[in-house]
Image: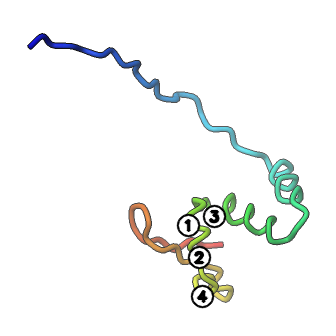
Amino acid sequence: MEQKHIALPQIKKQKDLPIVLNKQEVRELLKAPKYLKHRLILGMLYGCGLRSYELCGLLQSDVDFNRKTVFIRKKKGRQIVMFL
């Protein structure tokens, strides 16, 4: 049987550094939503570095306001405790 090869393009890795927001840009980002609920969502995603599915999986019991910690259940990698 004759060998057939398909040439696929190679995916290039990103070599440049990620863009980091300054304090004023973060404030504007957090003030942009109209509702407090949406501001809290953006704050948790940005401030704690959560993935969207990690945020959706949070329970009220996972947030400890006395210790200022958030417990993130194991989804990818290992279980971690984030500090606010």
Task: Residue at 69% x, 66% y: name it.
Answer: 44
Instruction: Judge left or right: residue 5 versus residue 42.
Output: left
Q: Which mark is residue 5?
A: none
Reading the image, the residue beneath label 2 is 58
Instruction: Report crowding for label 4: few under 14, some 14 to 19, many 20 or more residues within 10 A (C-alpha).
Output: few
Query: Dot 3, how many residues are within 10 Å of its Cα: few (below 14), some (14-19), or many (20+)?
Result: some
* Quadrant of the frame with the N terminus: top left
Residue type for callout 3 = Cys
Name the residue rendered at 86%, 50% in the picture.
24
Q: Quadrant of residue 84?
A: bottom right
Which mark is in front, 2 or 3? 2
Vertical order, 75 against 7 (above or below) = below
Q: Nearer the viewer, mark 1 or mark 3?
A: 1
Which residue matches tag 3? 48
Rendered location of residue 28, percent (x, y): 88, 52
Residue 51, quarter of the rendered image: bottom right
Helix, strand or loop at disc 3?
A: helix
Q: Earlier in the sequence, mark 1 or mark 3?
A: 3
Q: Nearer the viewer, residue 70 or 6?
A: 6
Q: Indicate the amino acid at tag 2.
A: Leu
CB atoms of marks 4 and 1 within 8 Å? no
Which amino acid lies under the numbered mark 1 shown in the image of this protein? Glu
40, above or below 49, in the image? below
Q: CA distance from mark 2 to mark 1?
A: 7 Å
**What residue is shown with label 4?**
61
Up/down of 56 relative to 25, above or below: below
- Left or right placement of residue 52 versus residue 42 in this view: left
Residue bearing mark 1: 54
In three-dimensional space, the C-alpha distance between marks 4 and 1, rounded to whole angstroms, equals 14 Å
Residue at 12 percent of width and 10 percent of height: 2
